[in-house]
């Protein structure tokens, strides 16, 4: 096992570094005043400091369940398990499916791949197309693994969003072989035009849907969750309790208090969408102007822009040169099972200013 390249990079950079590497939200958009009000209110109650139940406080699970139900995906608090970030959710599921084979997208989320390796899951990669996985290759793999991990909304790293057709085809294949879907969905609320339906919605008893407030609110609260049928949640709780007795109670109470005003949260989400859309379009336009040999699609949501060079360029070697000039990104090979260097790059556009975007891309161009 090796540490995450992204986490190592975050430790290696300083305030002078222009970072397009980590998936950091724009902290200027954090609803600090509203969270402060919520915090001051809950800390007056002694129960805030007490142990709580393993699956998460009732109020928060009900609030998350209600959001799904309003979208036509009937959910109760019994279908929700609160976790310490969605990374812990991933670990719990990897432990649940320990030593099995699993079908994943390629490229795929580095954090999930590391967890799968740690828990002995053998990964089979299926190439991503512009509208989701290659369906024929997916079925070929899934009929043997009967377990898959997918990020259908503004995928990390590729920013790919599954079409309605691909979502339906994936769901039908999972039903056909009576398999299981792990649907990772931390970016689904960060859409620029419209929100897509969850694949899990048509796989109520054959799916685990992961969510998080790290990308939509603030990361430091470390609150994520798993949505699944009640029996599966009970099984996962046994693993959860072997890791920690419960996720941070203080964070849960603060978050629950904040979410009581639904419109306030909706306004916050729209503010993020507007800001990120402007950043994504600016980043894409700047790339076309400064590094026209880098081929990519303008993102339709999420936090990342992904692409590759026309000519063969080792982007892992390139990032070492960029680091010397205080600019960093994540080379594409980190998101593949074999880690062989390639010409691809994942850029994060949400955390940098317009000035930093232009300056950083010009430095990368000079390093080419």
Image (tube, rainbow, N blue to C red):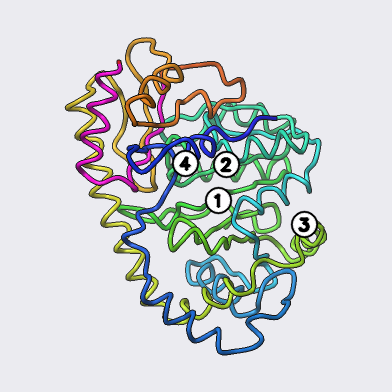
- Residue drawn at the location 61% of the way across and 55% of the way down: 209
Label 3, secondary structure: give it.
helix
Q: Which tag, 4 or 1, sits closer to the chain's start?
A: 4
Q: Which residue is mark 2?
A: 150
Asked whether disc 2 touches disc 1, contact meaning CB atoms under 8 Å apart, the reply is: yes
User: Badge 4, how many Cα within 10 Å: few under 14, some, many 20+?
Assistant: many
Is residue 319 placed above or below 283 in the rendered structure?
Answer: above
Determine crowd level at label 2: few under 14, some 14-19, many 20+ residues with C-alpha closer than 10 A: many
Residue 265, x across and y down, in percent: 39, 72
Residue range (magenta): 344-367
Mark 3 and mark 2 lie on one chain; the one further toward the N terminus is: 2
Whole-angstrom CA distance, mark 4 to mark 1, is 14 Å
Residue 124 colored in magenta in the image: no
Q: What residue appears at the point 57 percent right and 21 percent down from the top-left corner?
A: 339
Q: Are marks 3 and 2 in contact (CB under 8 Å)?
A: no
Element class at badge 4: loop
The image quarter in which residue 139 lies: top right
Label 1, on which residue?
A: 199
State yes or no: discs 4 and 1 in contact (Cβ < 8 Å).
no
Residue bearing the label numbered 4: 155
**Snapshot quadrant of residue 230:** bottom right
Task: Indicate which label's residue lies in the foreground, 3 or 2.
Answer: 3
Q: Is residue 350 inside the magenta stretch?
A: yes
Q: Which residue is mark 3?
A: 243
Residue at (65% x, 76% y) in the render: 57
Residue 275, position as x, y percentages in the image: 27, 55
Q: Is residue 300 above or below residue 253?
A: above
């Amino acid at each position: 096992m090796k540490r995450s390249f992204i986490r190592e990079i975050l430790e290696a950079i300083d305030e002078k570094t222009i970072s397009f590497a980590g998936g950091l939200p724009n902290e200027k958009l954090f609803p600090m005043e509203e969270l402060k009000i919520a915090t001051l209110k809950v800390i007056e109650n002694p129960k805030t400091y007490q142990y709580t139940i393993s699956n998460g406080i009732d109020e928060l699970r009900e609030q998350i369940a209600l959001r799904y139900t309003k979208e036509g995906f009937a959910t109760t608090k019994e279908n929700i398990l609160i976790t310490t970030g969605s990374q812990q959710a991933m670990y719990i599921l990897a432990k649940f499916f320990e030593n099995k084979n699993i079908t994943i997208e390629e490229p795929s989320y580095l954090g999930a791949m590391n967890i799968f390796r740690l828990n002995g899951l053998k990964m089979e990669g299926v190439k991503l197309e512009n509208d989701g996985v290659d369906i024929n290759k997916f079925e070929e793999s899934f009929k043997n693994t009967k377990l898959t991990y997918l990020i259908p909304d503004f995928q990390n790293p590729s920013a790919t969003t599954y079409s309605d057709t691909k979502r339906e085809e994936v769901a039908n294949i999972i039903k056909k072989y009576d398999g299981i879907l792990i649907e990772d969905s931390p970016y689904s609320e960060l859409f620029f035009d419209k929100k897509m339906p969850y694949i899990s919605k048509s796989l109520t008893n054959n799916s685990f849907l992961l969510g998080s407030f790290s990308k939509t609110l603030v990361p430091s609260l470390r609150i994520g969750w798993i949505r699944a049928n009640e029996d599966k949640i009970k099984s996962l709780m046994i693993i959860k309790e072997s890791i920690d007795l419960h996720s941070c109670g203080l964070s849960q109470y603060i978050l629950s208090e904040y979410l009581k005003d639904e419109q306030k949260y909706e306004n916050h989400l729209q503010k993020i969408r507007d800001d990120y859309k402007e950043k994504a379009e600016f980043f894409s336009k700047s790339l076309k102007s400064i590094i026209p040999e880098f081929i990519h699609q303008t993102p339709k949501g999420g936090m990342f822009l992904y692409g590759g060079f026309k000519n063969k360029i080792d982007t892992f070697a390139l990032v070492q040169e960029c680091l010397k000039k205080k600019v960093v990104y994540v080379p594409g090979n980190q998101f593949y099972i074999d880690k062989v260097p390639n010409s691809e790059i994942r850029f994060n556009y949400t955390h940098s200013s317009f000035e930093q975007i232009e300056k950083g891309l010009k430095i990368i161009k000079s390093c080419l």
